[in-house]
Image: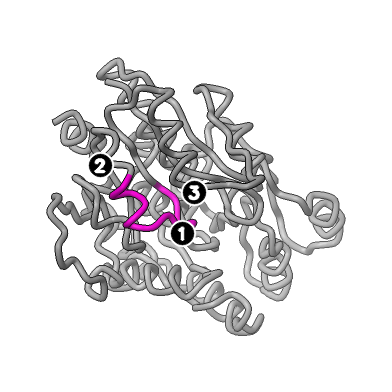
Amino acid sequence: MNILYRCDGSVKLGMGHVVRCLALADHLKENYDCNIKFAMRKSELGIKKIKETYPVLESNEKGFSYKEWLTDCIEKTKANVLIMDMRDGLTREELTTIKKKIRIEVVTIDDPEDKRLEAELAFYPSVPQLEKLNWTKFEGKLYVGWEYVILRKEFSISYSKNKNPVPKILISMGATDEKNMTCFVLNALNEIKEKFIAIIIVGIGYPHIKELENKLNSVNFQFKLHKNPDKIAKVMSQTDFAVISFGQTAYELAALKVPAIYLCLTDDHFESSKLFMNEGIGTSLGIYSHVKQEYLVGTILFHIIEKNKVKEMSDRAGLLNCSNLNRISSLIQG
């Protein structure tokens, strides 16, 4: 089977779409020997990451026609399946025209746009936004739940964990952190008198590394800085709770049974974070730009002191059936 992925990743967009597409692509290639290619636009960081493993068809944005470019990509790759994980305005009408010209099965991932209505398969976590979407005239199959979250296979491993005598707090704002929320959180941590160890992870696209290193020279708490670690799931699994930018990392931590405090960059992310609060596995502080430092300090302090509450949150996360790539892949294979 020839599969074409359509996604992007950059400092501005983040790398969550790229990460989960790679996770599914790797699973399909390893278990079904699928021929995988990617079609990508305006995403230098994402293209660089994908090219480590798979061929990429890049767009020429001069005089760009989405319909013509995507049609050309499908024809060149002789794709049987198009897997979409992007939110950049491809219309339902454009996708309909493409499907009339080329016989192709369309799969969409966590898609709020109207183009989702042309998909044969649609996969979503149980986020609140789903209830607000209009599914009139959708003739495909909709799959919703924790098992349809797409995560890298390292997050399906059960890692042994020692009881930390001093709480370990994970700080992770995704692969890029354009807004430098990492330093915002470090400022809050510096106000806390209780003992803890900060485990800080920054990704491949983090643009503020010098500022971060300078700040770490003057903090009054213990820390360990990891720059794009190879075994990121193992590092994350050894922490007691996390402060993160809501996104793909939130689902990864849920799979690892690590409770989290979420800072959200968009209203859509805030809506999605309510799923985690409803499950009792996380605390959302809302839109990052509106969060006051003292509120963040108080929330972190609660998690440090109330160890039993954090343990309960971890236990609840352990009841979730996160990311069944075998099930997702078998549905795509038909």
In front here: 209 or 225?
209
Name which residue type carries label 2: Lys
Name which residue type carries label 1: Gly
- Quadrant assignment for the C terminus: top left
The answer to whether residue 26 is left or right of residue 304 is left
Rendered residue at 53%/39% (across/down): 40
Rendered residue at 76%/51% (across/down): 207
Rendered residue at 20%/46% (across/down): 121
First in sequence, mark 3 or 1: give its number: 3
Residue farthest to the top, as pictured: 33
Task: Determine the CA span between mark 3 and mark 1.
Answer: 18 Å
The residue at which mark 2 appears reads as 100
Residue 91 falls within the magenta-colored stretch: yes
The residue at which mark 1 appears reads as 89
Which span is picked out in magenta?
Answer: 85-97
Rendered residue at 23%/50% (across/down): 122
First in sequence, mark 1 or 2: give its number: 1
How many numbered badges does the structure rendering display?
3
The answer to whether residue 198 is left or right of residue 262 is right
The residue at which mark 3 appears reads as 16
Return the x and y of residue 227 as percentages of the image width and height: 68, 40
In front here: 311 or 324?
324
